[in-house]
Image: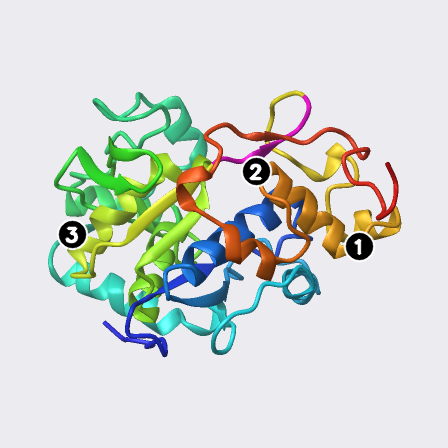
């Protein structure tokens, strides 16, 4: 396994946005929390762009500009996953050589229509292609079906320790390692990159908690160290759903158009965490992990952010 060492002997945290569009306030809040966790524990903070899928031209540059504008800094160069394809192939080759992969010819519709894997979460892969014979695989290739590559998992569940949620035991299925179009899958790339960069602390939204046992199990198979996880509450809209662009002025550019500064946005995010601060540097001085609210932040439409000096 290749290593891309950080400059810190105490590990690193990271933020890894996907450049599918501008970051919204929920993304910025999670990024600030990931930065705070790393900086207040003496870790490096790394920036990685997940640009293997859903890339919108210019989005990565705008995302990095927005993160810098709210006071987030990072160590070393930004790493782009599109430059690391040989390392993902090497990890897949190792798993294949160990007999831990198999080809899957199922379409998305077939998987949705199939019964869920025993004891697995809704949508878990039921193992349809797990035990195909050589003749059956050849027949499917002859039909022109593209083959994804799946992990042959040997456990049905796996436990992780989360700093905010405690012990969490979740289902593990035969997750996709490489999609049918040849692109390495997220669950593989994130594990390979965290291991290569020396990331030992992962802070992200709690919507990703259910997928974490899969990633931790895969990391174990690849011989990578245990990662310290912290899954933080999301920002939701007034209807209690995940924040999205359709919810109004939710990006930094939107807020600037309303006359609000990056400091106003940081102040609102700090307030949602129970602090009074206008910069990430100020927030770093008072931040305590134990005080992170357990409930999601409900973002009211537009009016939450007011230009400086307004009541």
- Residue 208 lies in quadrant: top left
Looking at the image, how many numbered discs can be counted on the residues?
3
Mark 2 neighbour density, 10 Å: few (under 14) some (14–19) many (20 or more): few
What label sits on residue 274 in the rendered view?
A: 2
Q: Which residue is mark 3?
A: 100
What residue is rendered at 27% in x and 54% in y?
227
- Residue 261 lies in quadrant: bottom right
Where does the C terminus fall, quadrant-wise?
A: top right
Residue 53 seen in the current view: no
Position of 13 relative to 258 (above/below): below
Label 3 secondary element:
loop
What label sits on residue 301 in the rendered view?
A: none
In this view, the residue in front, 219 or 136, is: 219
Position of 32 relative to 211 (above/below): below
**Left or right, 275 with reference to 106:** right
Mark earlier in primary sequence (1, 2): 1
Q: Which residues are magenta?
A: 233-238
Where does the N terminus fall, quadrant-wise?
A: bottom left
Position of 140 relative to 278 (above/below): above
Q: Which residue is mark 1?
A: 261
Q: Position of residue 30 (x, y in %)?
A: 53, 47
**Left or right, 33 with reference to 230:** right
- Residue 85 lies in quadrant: bottom left
């Amino acid at each position: 396994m290749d290593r891309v060492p950080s400059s810190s002997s105490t590990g690193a945290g990271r933020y890894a946005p996907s450049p599918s569009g501008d970051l919204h306030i929920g993304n910025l809040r999670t990024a600030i929390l990931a930065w705070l966790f790393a900086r207040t524990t003496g870790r490096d903070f790394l920036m990685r762009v997940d640009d293997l899928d859903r890339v919108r031209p210019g989005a990565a540059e705008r995302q990095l500009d927005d993160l810098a504008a709210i006071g987030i800094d990072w160590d070393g160069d930004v790493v782009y996953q599109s430059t690391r394809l040989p390392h993902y192939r090497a990890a897949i080759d190792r798993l294949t050589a160990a007999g831990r992969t198999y080809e899957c010819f199922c379409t998305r519709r077939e998987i949705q229509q199939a019964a869920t894997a025993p004891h697995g979460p809704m949508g878990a892969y039921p193992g349809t292609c797990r035990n195909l014979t050589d003749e059956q695989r050849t027949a499917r290739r002859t039909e022109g079906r593209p083959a994804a590559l799946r992990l042959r998992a040997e456990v049905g569940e796996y436990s992780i320790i989360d700093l905010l949620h405690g012990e969490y035991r979740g289902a593990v299925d035969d997750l996709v390692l490489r999609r049918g179009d040849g692109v390495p899958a997220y669950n593989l790339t994130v594990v390979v990159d965290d291991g290569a960069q020396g990331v030992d602390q992962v802070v992200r939204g709690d919507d990703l908690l259910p997928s974490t046992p899969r990633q931790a199990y895969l990391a174990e198979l690849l011989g990578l160290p245990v990662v310290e996880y912290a899954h933080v509450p999301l920002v939701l809209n007034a209807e209690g759903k995940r924040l999205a662009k359709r919810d109004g002025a939710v990006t930094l550019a939107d807020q600037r158009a309303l006359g609000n500064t990056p400091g106003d946005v940081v102040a609102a995010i700090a307030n949602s965490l129970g602090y009074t601060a206008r910069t990430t540097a100020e927030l770093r001085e008072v931040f305590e992990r134990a005080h992170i609210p357990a409930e999601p932040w409900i973002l009211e439409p537009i009016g939450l952010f007011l230009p400086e000096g307004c009541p």
